[in-house]
Amino acid sequence: MPEIVSPAEHATFINTFRCERSNQDEVVRINIDIIDRVASTFPGFISATVHRSTDGGRVFNYLQWESAEHLAAMQRSPEFQSIARRFAGLIEFEPHECEVVHIGERG
């Protein structure tokens, strides 16, 4: 389960996948396949969550890796490439490496 802390000792990524409403379920499935079949088996992986917008036009993932280099190594793998090809024609991709700057909590 993701743990959000500030300052984080790992790399955090929030990625946006813009898609047509009719493709949102498939974009979610591709993200889950990458996480469950590839990312979770790679060194440096910490956690990932997948979110869908209620308007159907976006999917987001929140990734935590030990470093950006660990993520890049996974993205270069043939296993990742074979699944990621399924995104072709379905998405506009906006990747973002982020820093946690504030955490608000109930109470």
Image: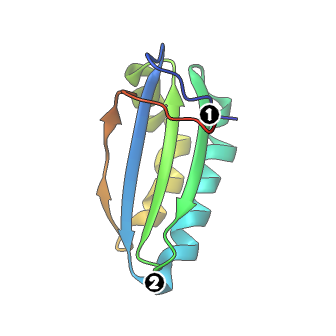
Q: Amino acid at mark 2?
A: Arg
Residue found 48% across the figure and 31% down from its top: 103
Q: Amino acid at mark 1?
A: Ser
Residue occupying the far bottom of the picture: 22
- How many C-alpha atoms fall within 10 Å of the one at disc 1: few (<14), some, or many (≥20)? some
In the rendered view, would you say 21 is above or below 26? below
Residue found 41% across the figure and 37% down from its top: 13
Residue found 31% across the figure and 58% down from its top: 93
Q: Position of residue 41 (x, y in %)?
A: 67, 31
Q: Position of residue 21 (x, y in %)?
A: 45, 84
In this figure, which colouring scheme has been used for the structure?
Answer: rainbow
Residue of label 2: 21
The answer to which of 14 and 73 lies nearer the viewer is 14
Question: Which labelled disc corresponds to residue 47?
Answer: 1
Provide the secondary structure element on which disc 1 rests. strand
The answer to which of 76 and 39 lies nearer the viewer is 39
The answer to which of 54 and 88 lies nearer the viewer is 54
Residue found 60% across the figure and 20% down from its top: 43
Quadrant, the C terminus:
top right
Cα–Cα gap, marks 1 and 2 = 26 Å
Q: Earlier in the sequence, mark 1 or mark 2?
A: 2
Would residue 1 appear left or right of 86 to someone viewing this image? right
